[in-house]
Amino acid sequence: MENEERAHLESHYQTKLESVKNEVTQLTDLLEQLLKAKNGEGTSAQPPEGAPAAHIPQTSQNQGENSANEQHFVPITPIQPTHAPAEGTLDNRSPSLMDHNKLFALEERLRVVEGNDWFDPMRAAEVCLVPNIVVPKDFRIPEFIKYTSLECRNTHLRSNCNKMAEVIRDDKLLIYFFQDSLLGSALSWYMRLDNVRIRSWRDLVEAFLK
């Protein structure tokens, strides 16, 4: 009885083994056809580059009453092609040339916004808040406390007058050097003043305190 069961198991394993061999043969033929179609050369048992990993089943046969059929799969690692990283496009222009181009573009935009006559000397004299001013040679420009629109305006005016005590009666100098004590939006406000309306130091103080 035992001999019959053993013979039956051996026959079953032999059938499985033959089936596996046939599958391996078919897989090998398929790989050879792929290589022929790709390279046009002789047959080869190696899989093509980039081909998916194939698993070849192997059967181990153990004799005995309680022996079991075990299958092991051996993966075939494909050879992946290597590619060099693509190089980006480099800007061959020198930094000085790029800065020059940016400056030229800004000048063109300024000409469009302000008009071409902005760079005319006659135009510059018109926009000057205190035209025809003469600064004494022995006058030393004081170090002003800067106003940034956050400080008290009255305190800043008093501080400015103390710094300009040497020429306190000269309205043109007081108006002209007042810009040196301003920063940020306060300086922008000063640059927008009209010399038609600002004729004296009092006019500037009144406009500043509004």
Image (cartoon, rainbow, N blue to C red):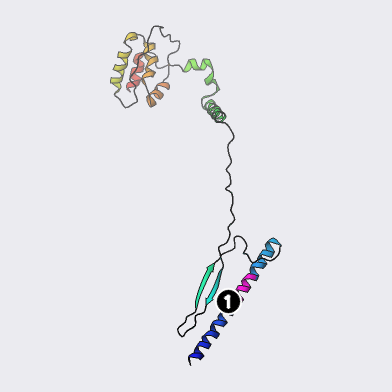
Question: Camera-side residue: 160 or 34?
Answer: 34
Q: Position of residue 18 (x, y in %)?
A: 59, 79
Circle count: 1
Q: Is residue 147 above or below residue 202?
A: below
Q: Position of residue 192 (x, y in %)?
A: 42, 22
Residue extending farthest to the bottom is 1
Residue at image point 39% right, 26% down: 184
Can you identify the residue that label 1 sits on? 20
Q: Is residue 81 above or below residue 198?
A: below
Given the image, on which type of amino acid does mark 1 rest?
Answer: Val
Residue at image point 30% right, 17% down: 159
Res. 151 image quadrant? top left
Residue at image point 54% right, 20% down: 117
Res. 27 image quadrant? bottom right
Q: Is residue 183 above or below residue 135?
A: below
Q: Secondary structure at mark 1?
A: helix
Q: Is residue 100 magenta?
A: no
Q: Main secondary structure of the magenta part?
A: helix
Q: Is residue 141 left or right of residue 35?
A: left
On the rendered image, what quadrant is the C terminus found in?
A: top left
The magenta region covers 20-28
Q: Position of residue 143 (x, y in %)?
A: 35, 16
Res. 33 image quadrant? bottom right
